Amino acid sequence: MNLEFLTRHWALVLAGILAAVITLFVVFRVWSDSAGGQLRAMHNALLRRRHELSRHQKVADKAEKKLAKLRAQADSVKPRHLQEAAEALEDAAALAKIADDQVMIAETRLRELILEEFPQNQHTALRARYFGDEGR
């Protein structure tokens, strides 16, 4: 392919590039809309939710330890600091509860997808793969 070819057939080259881009887009959409693509997307969402839950639980544990430390030194700590630590613990616990609820929702959606989109003989294997040995 040289400059002369490109100047003579620029429209064909441009149409070929455009057709390739459209074909790649259509293939990607078909792949992501398939049952396997949906399963991968929901599993990735579940993993993100579990990671968020772990992060929020660590923050709550840290806030709880800080509050326990401040309560142990209650006679030398300002009451305002105790109150702030208690409120921080409440906030962290609430965020951890929300994250736990989101994990449960993501797990439920993944289970529903497995039940709706895959044949019955694959259900046990898929649940074992994506949820471990729960037996549910």
Image: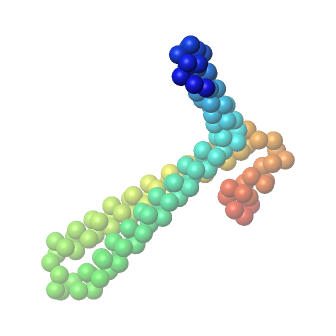
- Residue closer to the observer: 128 or 112: 128
So how many labels did they put on this image? 0
Residue 109 position (above or below residue 60)? above
Q: Position of residue 87 (x, y in %)?
A: 27, 65
State the residue at coordinates (60%, 46%). Answer: 42
Q: Position of residue 74 (x, y in %)?
A: 21, 83
Placement of the C terminus among the 4 image quadrants: bottom right
Q: Position of residue 115 (x, y in %)?
A: 73, 43
Question: Can residue 18 be spotted in the picture?
Answer: no
Residue 26 position (above or below residue 92)? above
Question: Can residue 35 be spotted in the picture?
Answer: yes
* Residue that sits furthest to the right in the current view: 121
State the residue at coordinates (40%, 72%). Answer: 61
- Residue closer to the observer: 125 or 86: 125
Please identify the quarter of the rendering in which residue 134 is found.
bottom right
Residue 110 position (above or below residue 35)? below
State the residue at coordinates (35%, 78%). Answer: 65
- Residue closer to the observer: 136 or 5: 5
State the residue at coordinates (69%, 62%). Answer: 132
Residue 81 vs residue 99: left or right? left
Residue 97 vs residue 69: left or right? right
Q: Position of residue 105 (x, y in %)?
A: 55, 48
Placement of the N terminus among the 4 image quadrants: top right
Residue 123 vs residue 55: left or right? right
Q: Give the colouring mode of the picture.
A: rainbow
